[in-house]
Amino acid sequence: MDHGGHGMTTDLPPFTLGRGLQWSADPFFLVACVLGLGLYAWGVVRLRRRGDAWPVGRTVSYVVGVLTIALVMCTRLNDYGMVMFSVHMVQHMVISMLSPILILLGAPVTLALRALPAAGRGRKGPRELLLMLLHSRYMRIITHPVFTIPLFIASLYALYFTPIFDFLMGSGAGHIAMMVHFLAVGVVFFWPIIGVDPGPNRPGYLMRMLELFAGMPFHAFFGIALMMASQPMVKTFENPPASLGIDALADQTAAGGIAWAFSEVPSVLVLIALLFQWYGSEQRQAKRQDRAADRDGDKELAAYNAYLASLDARGR
């Protein structure tokens, strides 16, 4: 039996964590994850062979970030997510809020810029095209909070509370497009806030915190709306397969609880990372000021010695 044209079997046994974590790869995301890990590994190896260092913490963060995508898209969680609202919400929250944070802390764009060879004079290779994209007007627009915050909010309300969600869930391509959208929205939302990579919009640390807290309450409100609903709100999940032994409304309430709780976890993670970044930035600034003060002190000392020497010469 197919579900919604996605080729998923609806006679799934009742959900357990053990069953959910069994291998069941979506080909698109499997290839994307393997490619993402392979390219990152190539960049790190290239830097090491050249004698350049690359922080281990960044590599670990990026790898774990990609593995979280594989966890929700290449296991039976993806199969259950087609028929259970609660499991789908776990997928959504991980791929839109946890995976982007970890991937961004891995600084893949910085690694690419350092690892890719520069093209010859007057030519444009991958490195030059990447730099053009980073400095483009398009990138300035899609990473600006006026764009990212409404997009982050609309991805919840405009998707789940309109027929768009049911339409996308009706086909394999639609489901993949929706998950890619969730990941992309998470990346553009968190990039200006927490990204290590260079970007066109890089506000001060206080403003970044405000941007973070401007979007998160809407996640909580969305979760509460699902939890308080007296009837199923999403058509896709209103008639779960009998083999699952679940009630649609109870499953929707669980989905709302997951969305509500998950709005807190990334907020804490990002806040901790931001504080560390802020502290590091202050330390670097202090060192620069110390070096500048040392240079100025050396100049003053040299000028004073020259003055004494001129007085000595004049006296003689």
Image: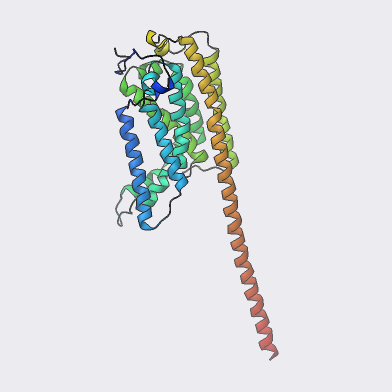
Quadrant of the frame with the N terminus: top left
Q: Nearer the viewer, residue 157 or 24?
A: 24
**In the image, is residue 272 above or below residue 283?**
above
Residue located 41% across and 13% down the image: 237
Please indicate, yes or no, whether residue 233 appears anywhere in the rendered image: yes
Q: Is residue 302 left or right of residue 129?
A: right
Q: Nearer the viewer, residue 7 or 76?
A: 76
Which residue appears at 57% of the width and 26% of the height?
217
Residue 116 lies, with reference to residue 206, above or below; the image says below
| Rendered location of residue 228, percent (x, y) | 55, 13
Q: Is residue 94 left or right of residue 296?
A: left
141 is higher (above) or lower (below) than 218: below
Residue 198, can we see it? no
Q: How many marks?
A: 0
- State the image coordinates of residue 181 (x, y, percent, origin top left): 40, 28
Closer to us: 74 or 233: 74
